[in-house]
Amino acid sequence: MRANSRTCQAALIARSPAGVLCLFLAAAAGLAAPHEYPFQDPNLPLEERVNNIISLMTIKEKVAFLSSRPGVPRLGISPMGHCEGLHGMAQGGPSNWGRRNPAPTTIFPQAYGMGETWDTELMRQAGAAEGYEVRYMVQSEKYRRGGLIVRAPNADLGRDPRWGRTEECYGEDPFFNGTMGVAFIQGLQGDHPRYWLTASLLKHFLANSNEDDRIATSSNFGDRLFREYYSVPFRMGFEQGGARCFMTAYNLYNQIPCTVHPVINDVTVKEWGVDGIICTDGGASANLFGRQGYYTNALEAAAGQIKAGINQFLDRTSPRDVGRALEAKLRTDAELDRVIKGTLRVFIRLGLLDPTNQVPYASIGAAGEPEPCTTDKHKALARLVTQKSIVLLKNSKNLLPLDRTKLKSIALIGPLAHEVLLDWYTGTPPYAITPLDGIKARVGPSVTVTCATNNDNGDAVKLARAADVAIICVGNNPIGVPGGAWGKVSVPSEGREAVDRKAINLEQEELVKQVFAANRKTIVVLISSFPYAINWTQEHVPAILHMTHNSQEHGNALADVLFGDYNPAGRLVQTWPKSIEQLPPMLDYDIRKGRTYLYFKGEPLYPFGYGLSYTTFKYSDLKTSAGSFPKDGSITVSVDVRNTGKRAGEEVVQLYVKHLNSAVERPIRELRGFKRVALQPGERKTVELVLPARSLAYWDGSKRAFVVEAGKIELQTGRSSADIRLKRTVNVTN
């Protein structure tokens, strides 16, 4: 069919370097292009549109469509790519996601810190803010950069605190990580019934929690752990969150590379409904015929990945290898068609093939709109997320919060006292408030604030001795060494991508000891991406806070907590061991051998779910909506919580389940619900949590199905996995 003049105008736009879809821009410019092809009709069913595009594409176009920025310019489908976005869109940062031309975006605390909020609604809001900024960056005339496929959240589990990329996950519990991930996904993708704000691409499937030699190691475990632990956050993200995309991991799972593992098709596609983008990690294809030795050459590896379900490659050579594999008859055209349909479905759900007046997110980035990261709304959200992420680990004799009116001097000490360190998967924030900035702004000129980053010349001790109170900021460097040289760390306790930690003690604890000896009113602020065995600090120092790196509002939020403008209520998302000797071997993926709070047999330094407050709470009246409930039903658990202190505060109510007579080995207890609730002094609230019977199931390998057992379970509510306040037994019936 010959294109008319308006179609030609749209085609010219499609070939422009703007990098967005032709029809998308044509509609924005008022070019009401007619439907040259059926797929351009937004009223057709999605699969009809996808099939029509496939029928129009040449083999060369199909092979090229396997890249991580695919498009079909001839058909008016311009390229659309990915961006990183674990805690804000990454268009800058130490790893140069902005290609050495950074663009500012709102930056939240590291994902690990976002997890420590235990606040699903806040996670949804953060995801929505990021999703909006991604759209703005892609669509605004000023930038025209990035991509609407967001590589987040990281659905991996922090089964061991030595994992170098612990900072990227939400913690060690599958239900918790899945719940927080679902909220973030829902924010990223939006709430429109038809169109996505952005496309959430989960990573890294599967069991990717060791860095050392990760491309050659195999994560080995049975079907029960696959179904009940390692895959749970992914399954929840797909089934409950609505995500349809993921990235495969570098490692092997039970001796088969994750990039070509049968579970991609057999489980994620056929059981969980994944029908979108399934991509490799960067350079993973070469590993298949390299270190992993799973195939003998690149053509076999390319053919194997297409068979497994991969439809996007994060390298430049694999699509060409797929073309050669087709020529060699190692794969068929029909198999190629099957996989590339996934990317086309994502494009349609993003509204990239539809008129802009039908796509609710198409107007984002219009001329005159302020940059979202500069708005008070996004700044305030970053501050709130950071406030809520801070965990109070110790507060002896109520040293905190500090009373500014009773202070004349503060010594702020430590290597992180005047830093906001950025991690490898961050962007560049529009501004960054350090602890020194935040504290000085909070106390004003009437309080003298001195600062020393170390005690090399006795400066730290001198300042601490002269001050009313000493605040010491210690922790890790999330990129290992200044400048972020790949695979390098400065001390054994550091970790990052490509490097697992070799120790969990804090080398900077020597500085803590020196400062504490000079001033007994010392507050330690541990700013870290993972747990540390700070045993001496816990025993001696009166007050300890934990927070993670990266937030643009880092210093303001810390000051808010130190001076009582915000009452901390963050909770830990991992078990913090007392020593490395309490941990099983790093490559033992059988968590039943003493890993995580689910199976940990020792006494931790801090348990999963732990965190204190400036006020106190009392639990009472634990009830259930029924004394028993059927295997296909649910029960509502309610508990009254009262603020018994003199300050307003928030409590994180946690619901655990213990199986009393199971036929199979079960965890010590399992988290099955939580809610963060705000209470004024003296206020009482009833917190309700719904417990579906299906969440009690275990995987029966002989039946290849989840099974809910009849029998008694113990419901436990409390402040952490080790601080259970009330218990109640109920029956699950046939």
Image (tube, rainbow, N blue to C red):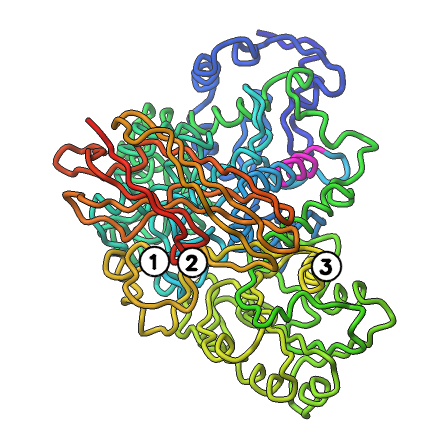
Residue type marked 1: Thr
Magenta residue span: 130-139
Q: Residue 136 magenta-drawn?
A: yes
Crowd tier of the residue under label 2, counting other residues whose Cα lies within 10 Å: few below 14, some 14–19, many 20 or above = many
Whole-percent x and y of residue 115? Answer: 51, 50
Residue type marked 2: Gln
Looking at the image, is 422 positioned above or below residue 182?
Answer: below
Residue wearing tag 3: 556
Structural distance between the alpha carbons of marks 3 and 1 = 33 Å
Residue type marked 3: Asn
Q: Are marks 1 and 2 in contact (CB under 8 Å)?
A: yes
Of residues 154 and 112, the one nearer the viewer is: 112
Q: Are marks 2 and 3 in contact (CB under 8 Å)?
A: no
Residue wearing tag 1: 596
Of residues 69 and 534, the one nearer the viewer is: 534
Instruction: Single out the residue that lies furthest toward the right.
Output: 445
Is the magenta region chiefly helix, strand or loop? helix
Q: Is residue 259 visible?
A: no
Looking at the image, is 268 positioned above or below residue 165?
Answer: above
Q: Residue 573 magenta-drawn?
A: no
Q: Are marks 3 and 1 in contact (CB under 8 Å)?
A: no
Residue wearing tag 2: 574
Of residues 578 and 382, the one nearer the viewer is: 578
Whole-percent x and y of residue 296? Answer: 25, 50
Structural distance between the alpha carbons of marks 2 and 3 = 25 Å
